[in-house]
Image: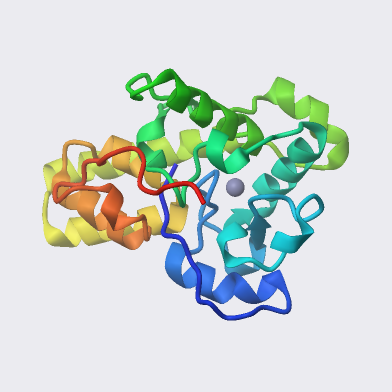
Amino acid sequence: MRPVNHVDTGVALTSHKDAKPNLIHSMGEFCAYCERATEAINLDVEHIKPQKAHSRLALTWGNFLLACTSCNTYKRHYQAANRQAGILRNQAWPHLDNTFSAYCYDQNGLITVSAGLTSLQHEQMAQRTLEMAGLDRTPSVAANYKELGLVYDIVSRRKKAWEKAQIALAAYQQNPTDIQCQSILGQAEETGFFSIWMSVFSAHASVKCELVRIFKASPNCFDHVGNPLNPRKAQRI
Ligand SMILES: [Zn+2]
């Protein structure tokens, strides 16, 4: 999961939707949870702590991320059905943690919590976030939510993104030029799924550094060769 920079312009808002341009400027046109690329019109300003239960945070910059309609809707239903105490403290968050280190992606479109996390607590935090956003949803899980009209195609989307990145990798290995790199970055930006491109290009530092840049991933979560740094980047509020 792509780590992003926290956004707080200090500007008082009359609607949470007014935060969208600043959030897009900082985080790009990508879902903070599933990482898909999507047009601005299909991105929601998402309340980390649900505004229904935390009305005083409805217009608070620190309570916003950008999410696709699918993730936002799933999360809203999940949070309504599952009481979540202390979610900032007890879960991994892309604006608070180096969430790139927290998960592994594979060629089948699956996402799992990384085995290399420093403590069981961090593993549990990452797992809770996975469940909250429905990122590990499978067709059988999707069936439970079918009546809500939600689409659960994220596994197949990740699988396709992996295949596309593999083809790009083969082209780059044959022709590792700047022009080829630019072509790959264009494909990656259009497709989304930062973590998949970073995983497939794990042996190519210069491409990884460019991926961090074009995906607007938090630069302080990566070193000069594009490897992830300390999994936690901020204190909880
Ligand atoms: Zn999403």
Residue drawn at x 60%, y 71% is 20
Left or right for 2, reference 209: right
Tell me where residue 222 appears, x and y as whole percent: 25, 48
The residue furthest right is 147
Q: Is residue 146 above or below residue 48?
A: above
Tell me where residue 192 appears, x and y as whole percent: 45, 51
Tell me where residue 144 appears, x and y as whole percent: 81, 26
Q: Quadrant of residue 114?
A: top left
Left or right for 184, reference 29: left
Q: Nearer the viewer, residue 21 or 198?
A: 21
Q: Is residue 164 visible?
A: no
Q: Nearer the viewer, residue 226 or 121?
A: 121
Q: Is residue 202 above or below residue 193?
A: above
Residue drawn at x 28%, y 56% is 219
Tell me where residue 122 appears, x and y as whole percent: 44, 27
Q: Nearer the viewer, residue 189 or 60?
A: 60
Residue drawn at x 54%, y 26% is 127
Q: Quadrant of residue 134?
A: top right
Left or right for 7, reference 226: right
Q: Is residue 2 visible?
A: yes
Q: Is residue 212 above or below residue 91?
A: below
Residue drawn at x 35%, y 47% is 233
Q: How many marks?
A: 0
